[in-house]
Amino acid sequence: MSRVLPVVGPGTWTASKPQERHFSGRMWEIREAALTLFSERGYYGTGMEDIARVVGIRASSLYNHVPSKQILLADIMLTTMRELIRVFDESSKQAQASRNPTAELRLAMEAHVRYHATHRRDVRVGNREIASLEEPYQGEVRQQRRTYARRWQAMIERGIKAGSFSTPSAQLSTYALLEMGIGVSQWFQEGGPLTLDEIADHYAAMALRQLSADIKSTNGAARAGRKSARKRSASG
């Protein structure tokens, strides 16, 4: 069971349960400013005065909203991991009803790629700043990372058991596929020669080939997954 980290501030900010936050406009501006600056300059290259300057308030006033830079970093990194786990679980649920391991892998890879293409700042901070987190936040993020990787490994192991996948090591295949998708965050730009759907589809096909899976059998699931992803994007 995940620890519940303490609520800080006037009952509006909790790093452990971002889905329960109710940000005011100012709080959201502060978080967005911190996310951009951490992504561009790094955690230690960003001061609270820098965040305040972007938001357009005095540094002393910033502390009325959030007590420390560390809380901002923790919120960003915990939110990233919880969102990744959520989108994986949603994609897995869509495919498991058909009991088709290849469809499940395709949808998971497409969701993984989409998230990393559309949350480039979050991913950059998450991959670079783990050592900057203090406890208990660092331990919580590391646990969430292990949870995410285990979800993927369990999915691959189900496919091996069903005879749909072939790999000498489900664990190594997990790491390879995760790293492959994470790399999209480094180069993806909207308006490029390929759409995000096309990129996600291509990466899913590469993932299936790595596991010697039947690509054609997943086409219907891919179309359904894209439709669902677009609906979630429009509603968000």
Image: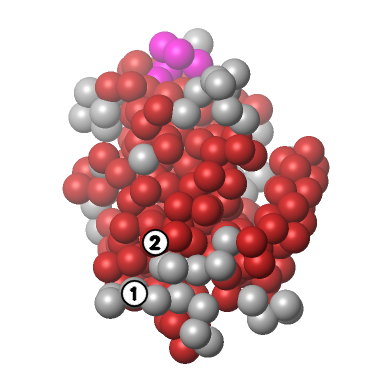
Q: Which residue is mark 1?
A: 167
Choose between 187 and 208: the one closer to the eye: 208
Q: Quadrant of residue 62?
A: top left
Above/below status of 126 relative to 86: above
Give the number of the disc on residue 188.
none
Choose between 73 and 7: the one closer to the eye: 73
Q: Main secondary structure of the magenta part?
A: helix
Packing grade of label 2 (10 A; few <14, some 14-19, many >=20) is some
Left or right, 217 with respect to 39, comes to right
Choose between 100 and 15: the one closer to the eye: 100
Indicate the position of residue 67 as horizontal and vertical percent values. Answer: 39, 38
Indicate the position of residue 129 as horizontal and vertical percent values. Answer: 26, 42
| Quadrant of the snapshot with the N terminus | bottom left
Above/below status of 38 relative to 104: above
Q: Which residue is mark 2?
A: 210
Q: Which residues are magenta?
A: 51-55
Q: Residue at x 42, y 12 (%)?
A: 53
Q: Quadrant of residue 50?
A: top left
Q: Amino acid at mark 2?
A: Gln
Q: Residue at x 50, y 23 (%)?
A: 189
Above/below status of 96 relative to 8: below
Packing grade of label 1 (10 A; few <14, some 14-19, many >=20) is some
Indicate the position of residue 169 as horizontal and vertical percent values. Answer: 28, 76
Left or right, 47 with respect to 114, comes to left
Q: Look at the numbered discs 1 and 2 and tell me whether their residues touch, using CB distance below 8 Å.
A: yes
Q: Marks 1 and 2, how far apart in space? A: 8 Å
Visible residue check, residue 64: no
Visible residue check, residue 37: yes
